Amino acid sequence: MAKTRLDNLMMIRGMAPSREKARAMVLAGEVKVNGLRVDKPGASFNEDVDIVVECSGPRYVSRGGLKLEKAIASFNIDFTNKVVLDIGASTGGYTDCALQHGAARVFALDVGYGQLDWSLRNDLRVVCLERTNIRYFSLEQLGQQVDIITIDVSFISTALVFPVIKDMLKNDGSIISLIKPQFEAGRNKVGKKGVVRDPDVHREVLINCITSATKAGLFCTGITYSPITGPQGNIEFFIRLNKEWLSPELEVEKEVALVVSEAHQQLGGKGI
């Protein structure tokens, strides 16, 4: 197998915007290859080596990147050379995370304006779709189907998003959707300051969201929780959706109960 310079490998995988930046990261001691720190940008490795960047500063432009990073690991989704639609991009935490995990192109869509981080706005791999409401967006406007769709929306239920995006996803693609109970549960089930603490409500919300996705022709193939709580301490969750069942099929209710229980144990909340 042919070997490639480390700085080139990092640039190819989207872990650095340029070879010069990759070189600087290696020299700063921020790069490990197969678990060992490497300080020579010109060192050559097989193309399938494991490369990890451990930055001393914030890894992503917003903490949303840390949320998505956990979901990517939990669902074992490969972003290498993939085209991604990031719905609810905001500052660009998910977009940044997708690029650092090797995405070739990211459509960063948000109903707002002027929020996307400047570094991403000027990245040639990013297509900024501002002032765009996903509910009224179409495949024709997007121009192509994508490999992966990420979703992080507020003040709207994901049930309104799932039917719109199905046609935007390739048949073998995946959706990673953040589920925010505070925007999915009925008003009578949301506590003070917009916080949902009851695990029963969390389970209900997840089941309802998964049911809505199924009605839209999308099947739940994975469930996990966000490692970081939302504003005011809300526990949030991720679901993975595909157009087809993966083997073996997920026992949804059992998995929901397990993930909610683990989330409350790790992040706090009402006892289960």
Image (tube, rainbow, N blue to C red):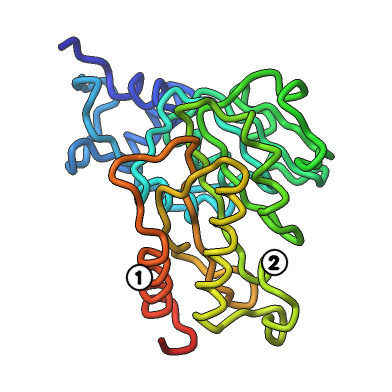
Q: Which quadrant would the C terminus be assigned to in this image?
A: bottom left
User: Which of 76 and 128 lies nearest the eye of the viewer?
Assistant: 76
User: Which of 131 and 247 lies nearest the eye of the viewer?
Assistant: 247
When the figure is inspected, residue 19 is found, relative to residue 73, above or below; the finding is: above
Q: How many marks?
A: 2
Which residue is at 50% across, 33% downward?
99
Say whether disc 2 or disc 1 marks the residue closer to the N-terminus. Answer: 2
**Disc 2 residue crowd, few under 14, some 14–19, many 20+, Cα 10 Å:** some
Which residue is at 41% across, 48% downward?
221
When the figure is inspected, residue 3 is found, relative to residue 104, above or below; the finding is: above
Query: Label 1's element?
Result: helix
Task: Find residue 81 and report its horizontal and vertical position in percent.
Answer: 44, 22
When the figure is inspected, residue 65 is found, relative to residue 207, above or below; the finding is: above
Label 2: which residue? 183
* Residues at marks 2 and 1, CA–CA distance in whole angstroms: 22 Å
Task: Find residue 193 and report its horizontal and vertical position in percent.
Answer: 72, 82
Amino acid type at mark 1? Leu
Which residue is at 44% across, 24% downward?
20
Which residue is at 26% across, 20% downward?
42
The label shown at residue 258 is 1
User: Which of 26 and 1 lies nearest the eye of the viewer?
Assistant: 1
